[in-house]
Image (spheres, helix red, strand yellow):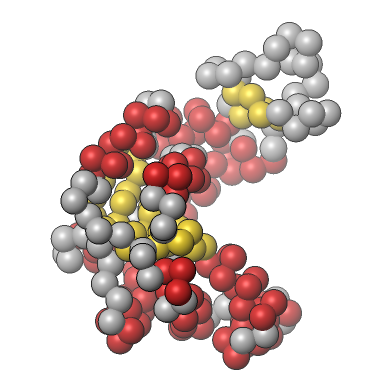
Amino acid sequence: MRLILFGPPGAGKGTQAARLLERHPSLAHLSTGDMLRAAVSEGTPLGKQADAFMKAGDLVPDSLVVGLVVERLQKPDCADGFLLDGFPRTRAQAEALDTALDGAGIELDKVVVIEVPDSLIVERITGRRMDPETGAIYHMKFSPPPAAVADRVTQRKDDTVEAVTARLSKYHSETTPVLPFYDAKGLVVRVDGVGAPEDVALRIESALEGVG
C-alpha cells in the first residue's frame, strides 16, 4: 500500500498511523521532518541544500522537500509500501509531488482523511493536562487526573482555545484545498474519526480493504 494520511490537529492521526504500522509492518512510515533530519545528517546533496536554508532561518522550498520525499520513496524499505504522514500540506506541494511521483514511476493507492468536527477537536485539545512531575497526560473530561495530582496538572501553551483555533484555521485554509486535487483522481477515502481509537482503526481498515 502506498498511502498519504491526512487529518486536522487533534484528529488522532498519530495514533492511527501507529496502528496502521502495527497491522502492516511492511509499510515505511515517512514524515518530512524525519527525512530532512536524515538527509542533513547523511550529508546528501539535497540534505546539504536543505541545511543551508535552515541555518539561514529560511523555510526549505517545496521543490527541495518534494525532491527529498521522492528520493526517500526510492529506498528499499519503501518497496513494499509506505505511509506518508503530514505531507503534502498545500495544493502546490500536492501538484509538485504528483509530477515528481509520475516521473519516478510511483503511484499512490489511497489518501486517507480522518475527519473530526472542529468543535470536538477544540474540546479534545483544550481539555488536555499534564502532570509536570510524572509526565502523565490526562483529559479533564475523558480521563480526569486523580484527586492527588489534580491541583498540579498544567495546560500546554498551544492547547488553549485561541491556539487550537488558529491551527485549525491554518489547516482548513492551506491543507483542506489539497483534497479536491486527490478527489479528482479517485484516491480519497474519508474516515469518521469520532469515537474510540480502536473503532476508528477498524473504519480505516475497512476503507483500505482490497488496497495493496
Who is closer to the viewer here, 103 or 172? 103
Q: Residue 32's x, y, as percent?
A: 53, 67
The image quarter containing residue 97 is bottom left
Q: Is 151 placed left or right of 86 in the picture?
A: right
Who is closer to the viewer here, 65 or 89? 65
- Quarter of the image for the C terminus: give it: bottom left
The image quarter containing residue 4 is bottom left
Q: Is 6 placed left or right of 164 in the picture?
A: left
Q: Residue 38's x, y, as percent?
A: 63, 73
Regarding residue 37, the answer to whether it shows in the image is: yes
Residue farthest to the right, as pictured: 133
Q: Residue 8's x, y, as percent?
A: 43, 47
Task: Say which residue appears at 44% left-offset and 52% top-offset.
Answer: 25
- Quarter of the image for the N terminus: give it: bottom left
Task: Say which residue appears at 38% left-offset and 54% top-offset.
Answer: 5
Q: Is 157 placed left or right of 77 in the picture?
A: right
Who is closer to the viewer here, 33 or 180? 33
Task: Say which residue appears at 77% left-offset and 16% top-offset.
Answer: 149
Q: Is 34 placed left or right of 209 in the picture?
A: right
Image mark count? 0
Regarding residue 179, the answer to whether it shows in the image is: no
The image quarter containing residue 106 is bottom left
Q: Residue 58's x, y, as percent?
A: 64, 78
